[in-house]
Image: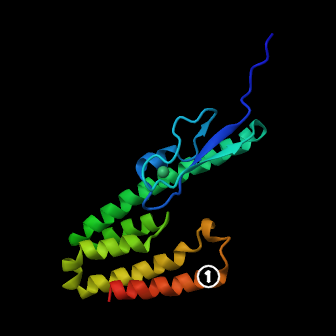
């Protein structure tokens, strides 16, 4: 009986999961190939890469893949919640928007998206000091929470503190 041929190496697809990563790249995050079908870069500015590993580590990388796919799905959900939150700012029920922002921020929170929000809703924010105050308070809380996420654990606390201070300053500028 012939032995099943094992490939000499495998590849895992890595996308950088953040607010700018496109959905196509996110959909490959964690995928394992013998023979890569989707080989990055998939588009200009694509920051994905393939990591090569030996068959002896397949089990470990399969476990990683599960976690990575979950993270990619969470990022897509986060975007959807953030979008819904931004859209519901026009409504009368601010607590609904706050709840959606809170759910989104449990996955991640990005200053760049607050900047976008402020540009997009400038008119509404300009005439509504109470809304600015509530959002400022909420977002400062999220910005502090952000750095308790696992992925920031390897970063020196001195650096985190500097980021936190800068970020909070920026939020105060954006939502005076
Ligand atoms: Zn990519």
- Residue 168 point in image, percent of width and height: 46, 85
State the quadrant of the N terminus. Answer: top right
User: Count the marks: how many?
Assistant: 1
| Residue ranking furthest to the front | 44
Q: Is residue 12 above or below residue 130?
A: above
Q: Which residue is drawn at 32% across and 69% down?
A: 97
Q: Can residue 93 be seen in this view?
A: no
Quadrant in which residue 163 is drawn? bottom right
In the depicted view, which residue is nearer to us: 133 or 96?
Answer: 133
How packed mark 1 is, by other alpha carbons closer than 10 Å (few <14, some 14-19, many 20 or more), is few
Quadrant in which residue 127 is drawn? bottom left
- Residue 84 point in image, percent of width and height: 31, 61
Q: In this view, does 133 lie above or below 146?
A: below
| Residue ranking furthest to the top | 1
In the depicted view, which residue is nearer to us: 77 or 62?
Answer: 62
Q: Residue at x 24, y 74 (%)?
A: 121
Beta carbon of the mark 1 residue lies under 8 A of ligand 1: no
The answer to whether residue 34 is left or right of residue 163 is right
Q: Which residue is drawn at 53% across and 73% down?
A: 146
- Residue 107 point in image, percent of width and height: 50, 63
Q: Residue at x 67, y 78 (%)?
A: 156
- Residue 82 point in image, percent of width and height: 36, 64
């Amino acid at each position: 009986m012939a032995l099943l041929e094992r490939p000499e190496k495998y590849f895992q697809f890595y996308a950088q999961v953040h607010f700018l990563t496109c959905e196509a790249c996110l959909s490959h995050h964690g995928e394992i190939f013998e023979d890569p079908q989707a080989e990055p870069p998939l588009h200009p500015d694509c920051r994905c890469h393939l990591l090569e590993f030996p068959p002896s580590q397949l089990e470990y990388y399969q476990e990683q893949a599960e976690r990575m796919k979950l993270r990619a799905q969470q990022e897509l959900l986060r975007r959807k919640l953030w979008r819904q939150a931004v859209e519901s700012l026009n409504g009368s029920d601010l607590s609904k928007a706050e709840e959606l922002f809170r759910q989104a921020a449990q996955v991640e929170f990005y200053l760049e998206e607050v900047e976008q929000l402020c540009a997009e809703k400038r008119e509404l924010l300009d005439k509504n000091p109470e809304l600015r105050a509530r959002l400022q308070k909420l977002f400062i809380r999220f910005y502090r929470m952000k750095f308790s996420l696992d992925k920031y654990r390897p970063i020196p606390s001195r650096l985190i503190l500097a980021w936190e201070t800068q970020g909070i300053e920026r939020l105060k500028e954006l939502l005076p």
